[in-house]
Image: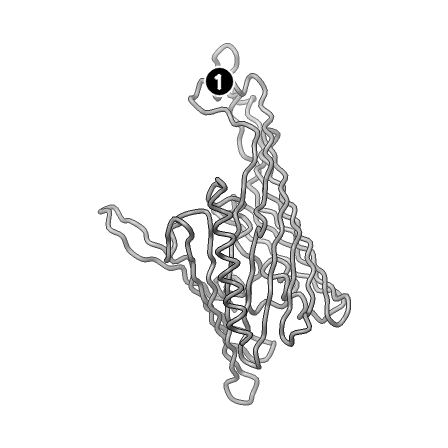
Amino acid sequence: MLDKKVILIVLSFISVLKLSAQDKVAPKYSNEFLQIGVGADALGLSNAVVASTGSASSGYWNPAGLTKVNKWLEVNAMHSEYFAGIAKYDYLGLAKTIDSSSAVGFSFVRFAVDDIPNTTQLIDNAGRIDYDRISTFTAADYAFLFSYARKMKIEGLSVGGNFKIIHRKIGDFAKSWGFGIDAGAQYQRGKHWKHGLMVRDVTSTFNAWIFNLNDEMKEVFVKTGNVLPQNGLELTLPRIILGSQGKYDLGKKGIYVAGELDMAITLDGKRNVLIKSKPFSIDPYMGVEFGFKNFVQLRFGIGNIQKIKDFDDKESLTIQPNIGF
């Protein structure tokens, strides 16, 4: 009976969020740096961890998983680089148990490109090119997540939430501050099955942008045919992630296999994912893990399933395979 009730609640919740989203205009891929993922274990599983996460990184993936932390303080950290080292991605996660049924966490994420050349002042007032007028700036996205999780009276059920602060900055030209809330739940049924629900930006997240362009830069924008940016709000609509994991022992020597399937449901219109429509799109991804107790794990994942066009305008289905050890 509980499974049917949970399914009905989730479906009703999706319908409410979808109706709410239809009344709002929002860009696709807003605050998308928070969808990259953290932790080598999760990345090896193509981020299919919403149902199974249970470490300090749960503050990022599903705050309900923080109730599985059994240490006074647990710390996770990661650094990675993209586009041949041009973009830097950093993460720090902390988790601490309060008592036998609750825990708190903190997560920090930074995604940035440093030392970008600013050539808007390359030509002086006399029309001459002066390379000494080139300066550099940084474009960076920051996220601060404050998490709380608690075990409920229903056996196997945990819930959690995040209050997050978003700061995005493009040199001295533009900056924004945003605030949002995430909500998550995990339910373990028996020994083998776990289920998870994560709703990011559950109330929608608002980023307030402020642009600071001097008269000389505004003139450059106009002469080069660019539109002058205006102060305003950027809205991030809710993203719903459903996940289920099954885990079984292979013999009695501590060897096991676990597999999880997650589905991310976005409400900002048609995306290039496996299941796409105007009201919402569904992006499935899955991961399989072979392990020996808590010592060694070998992980495989499949994600980023989408159709691409070649030079002959023919579509083909592509996937991104991941592996981790």
Taking depth in this image into account, of 219 and 118 the one nearest to the observer is 219
Identity of the residue drawn at 40% across and 59% down: 320
Q: Is residue 172 above or below residue 222?
A: below
Say which of 77 and 100 sits in front: 100
Q: How is the image coloured?
A: one colour
Q: Dot 1, how many residues are within 10 Å of its Cα: few (below 14), some (14-19), or many (20+)?
A: few
**Residue, x 77% and y 66% (percent of image)?**
98
In the image, what residue occupies the spot 46% across and 45% down? 22
- In this rendering, the answer to whether 228 lies above or below 57 is above
Q: Position of residue 83 (x, y in %)?
A: 47, 47
Looking at the image, is 116 positioned above or below residue 81? above
Residue 302 occupies which quadrant of the picture?
Answer: bottom left
Residue 279 in the figure: left or right of residue 291: left
Q: Name the spot of residue 194 as percent of width and height, x first.
A: 55, 73
Asked whether 162 or 60 is in front, the reply is: 162
Picture mark count: 1
Q: Quadrant of residue 112?
A: top right
Q: Amino acid at mark 1?
A: Ile
Reading the image, the residue beneath label 1 is 129
Residue 63 percent location from the top left of the image? 63, 61
The single residue placed furthest to the top in the displayed view is 126
Expressed as whole percent of the image width and height from the top left, the position of residue 226 reads: 45, 24
In the image, 90: left or right of 83?
A: right
* Residue reaching furthest to the left: 312
- Could you tell me which secondary element the residue under label 1 belongs to? loop
